[in-house]
Amino acid sequence: MKTSFSTMNLIRYTVAFVFIVSGLMKLLNADLANHFLNIGLPYPELLLKIVILLEIGCGALILASKYVKNAVIPLIAIIIAAILLTKLPLLTSGILLFAFNARLDIVMLVLLIALYKRYP
């Protein structure tokens, strides 16, 4: 089944919106940035800046329909890391709590994979 052009555009716009807003919130919201800094990653300040740059930059590329296949790769890595670092530990509290808190991450991962497969 072939996906229509307008459906792929809607997916592209949605993915771009989520990542651009996410990057901007990390940049402008100290509480969100502090949450990221307290995850326990090495070089948290540098990683935060890299994640902000990738989310905004790759989101903008996806929005502009430029280098979409290349732009989704780092975003897939970010989503997988987010699931592993912040959502997977919730499994100890139950599968339903994990599923609820990971729902956006899982949907975004699926949409990113769809974009990767669709664009040359």
Image: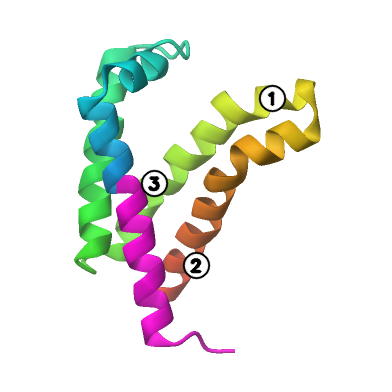
**In the rendered image, the vertical position of residue 71 relative to residue 81, given as above or below:** below
The answer to which image quadrant residue 23 occupies is: top left
Query: Would you call the spot at circle 1 few (<14 residues within 10 Å), some (14-19), or many (20 or more)?
Result: some
Q: Secondary structure at mark 3?
A: helix
Rendered-image quadrant of the N terminus:
bottom right
Query: Would you call the spot at circle 2 few (<14 residues within 10 Å), some (14-19), or many (20 or more)?
Result: some
Q: Position of residue 8 (x, y in %)?
A: 40, 76
For disc 3, the marked residue is: 75
Q: Position of residue 111 (x, y in %)?
A: 49, 61
In this rendering, would 59 be left or right of 108? left
Question: Mark 2 or mark 3: which comes first in sequence?
Answer: 3
Dot 1 and dot 3 residues touching (CB under 8 Å): no
Question: Mark 1 or mark 3: which comes first in sequence?
Answer: 3
Q: Which residues are magenta?
A: 1-19
* Amino acid type, label 3: Leu
Seen at 33% across and 47% down, the residue is 19
Q: Nearer the viewer, mark 1 or mark 2?
A: 1
Q: Which mark is residue 114?
A: 2
Q: CA distance from mark 1 to mark 2?
A: 27 Å
* Residue 18 counted in the magenta span: yes
**In the rendered image, the vertical position of residue 1 relative to residue 91, given as above or below:** below
Q: CA distance from mark 1 to mark 3?
A: 22 Å
* Amino acid type, label 2: Ala
Q: Secondary structure at mark 1?
A: helix
Query: Would you call the spot at circle 3 few (<14 residues within 10 Å), some (14-19), or many (20 or more)?
Result: many
In this rendering, would 75 be left or right of 20? right
> How is colour applied across the structure in the image?
rainbow
Rendered-image quadrant of the C terminus:
bottom left
The majority secondary structure of the magenta stretch comes to: helix
* Amino acid type, label 1: Leu
Q: Which mark is residue 90?
A: 1
Dot 1 and dot 2 residues touching (CB under 8 Å): no
